[in-house]
Amino acid sequence: MSMKGKALFTFQSENKEEISIQENEELVIFDDNSVDGWLQGENSKGQKGLFPASYVEVFRPRSNSNLTDCSISPVGSPGNDSSFSPSAANMPFHMQQGYYDDDDDDWDDWDDSSTVVDDDGRSGTNGHSHQSPHSNNPNVHYCAKPYMERQDSISSSRKGSMVGRNLNRFSSFVRSGVEAFVLGDVPMNAKIAESYTIEMGPKGPQWKESPTPFSCSIEDPTKQTKFKGIKTYISYRVTPSHNARPVYRRYKHFDWLYNRLLHKFTIISVPHLPEKQATGRFEEDFIEKRKRRLILWMDHMTSHPVLSQYEGFEHFLMCADDKQWKLGKRRAEKDEMMGANFMLTFQIPNEHQDLQDVEERVDSFKTFAKKMDDSVMQLTHVASELVRKHLGGFRKEFQRLGNAFQNVSQAFMLDPPHCSDALNTAISHTGCTYENIGEMFAEQPNYDLFHMLDKLSLYQGLLANFPDIIHLQKGAFAKVKESQRMSDEGKMDQDEADGVRKRCRTVGFALQAEMNHFHQRREVDFKEMMQAYLKQQIAFYLRVGQQLERTLHMYDNL
């Protein structure tokens, strides 16, 4: 129920989720239950968004048997907090992909909502158990992961002054767990069962290459049915190179994996899946387009030194048994090394890096990424427009030209004594040639422009992820500066400030490694894209030239 409120202080918004409020401004509060110290409402300008609960007085209606009045109370005490699960609208752009289910289908053929009980008797809710034993599937191999108690809040036994937490608890810096990691709020009370190494390369920090690189093919999209034809879906044959044993996956299996990747690898640019489509999902052109883009997505996954090692990815690629699939799926969904804990898995080099230099390098990459994003969008627009012309304008114009030549030939036949059959035939054939060229133009995007657009779409998604990832590093830098200031003022032990700086180094190394990997893949991918496009263009115009040459020879002996 909405209610009225008044701003006690002026607040200036810092991102698109927040709104500015002025002291004594009248507000509309949508819900008086604050979420991590924030309220959602509307200011006098009609803008809707978040603002600090402690900056506001809320006029709550209070009723008794005879009258109704209003009570005024500040909002922001712990008693007013409530649990909250952010909607897709509050998620970063790169985490919104795959949020809605595809295929208008449930999960009944590969999952259920029953409670699972492990061998040790611990049961979980919503079908998620606590740590389960090793899988018996010989195709799937897991590291033993000891049970880890999550403790993202501040330890009550911690001593001394601490750096303040971000007021905006909806920011990616907070939700990703990076803030908790940088401030040392992650308990080290369990053995870390996975690790990802960052090493120094010729261009700076880089991910250590996978010791067992592999590739994976996606082929043979096949329409299948279940429930006696009531439900229809497309199945893809997925074959990893390291065992050559195919498994069959639907789009929603890719979607599940994608969401697991987003929640775990917050500091890595996870490629977006091909877009979903409500209608026309079984049309041949759409199936072919989705297959091409899934292949690019898979190539990026297998080439990434970190993503390719994720055991949930291995499970997706190798598990062929329905029962083991469910167990592995739930094991991945209970992964403890998420959020702040994931940051503990990095092994960083001993080399010293000045944080100011790192910040400048990140700023430079941010400028580059923005410019590349703009240029990729421009090229996408131009290429899409060219496709439209190939399919429509070019074909029609060549067909009109061909038809005009044929009309000339027909006119020459109207006066038999003076007509030349050979000339008429040659002109008529010229008209047919240009009609064929029009059809060639309509077919050509299948060989070059569509593949270019597929690659550009992949990079649009990758680039769209970086603003949120860079925001994580910026937040870490801010905490380092704040902790050092507090240490200089005697409000924090220097050891604690050094700890914040050390953990910020981990975030910096991870981001730089991801930046370097992006540049490496960019050079490879765009070289291949441009070479393939130019080769197809050369082959196309050679075919056009050959058709015109054959037609030209028909005039030689007239």
Image (spheres, helix red, strand yellow):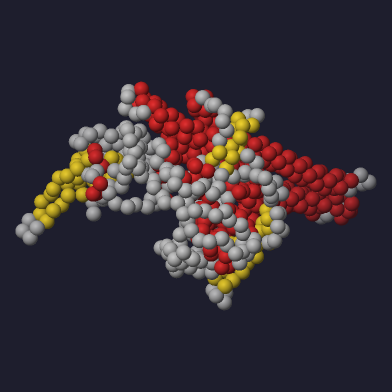
Q: Is residue 406 visible?
A: no
**Location of residue 222 (image quadrant):** bottom right
The residue lying furthest to the left in this view is 66
In depth, the one of 220 and 497 nearer the eye is: 497
Of residues 520 and 19, which is closer to you in this image?
520
Quarter of the image for the N terminus: give it: bottom left
Q: Percent position (x, y) of residue 105?
A: 50, 65
Q: Is residue 111 left or right of residue 524?
A: left
Q: Residue at x 13, y 53 (%)?
A: 62
Name the residue at the right extreme: 557
Residue 56 visible here: yes
Q: Name the foreground residue: 488 vs 318.
A: 488
Q: Nearer the viewer, residue 391 or 353?
A: 353
Residue 520 falls in image quadrant:
top right
Residue 356 placement, left or right of 48: right
Residue at the extreme bottom of the image, as rendered:
228
As displayed, is residue 82 above or below residue 120? above
Pinpoint residue 36: horizontal percent, then vertical percent: 31, 45
Q: Residue at x 51, y 58 (%)?
A: 331
Say whether residue 135 is left or right of residue 343: right
Q: Is residue 198 above or below residue 318?
A: above
> Residue 466, image x and y in percent?
51, 38
Estimate the x, y position of residue 221 in percent, counting from the top left.
65, 62
Q: At 43% from the left edge and 64% from the top edge, which residue is drawn?
A: 123
Q: In this rendering, is residue 277 above or below 390?
A: below
Q: Quadrant of residue 198?
A: top right
**Residue at coordinates 86% horizontally, 47% vertically from top-left?**
550
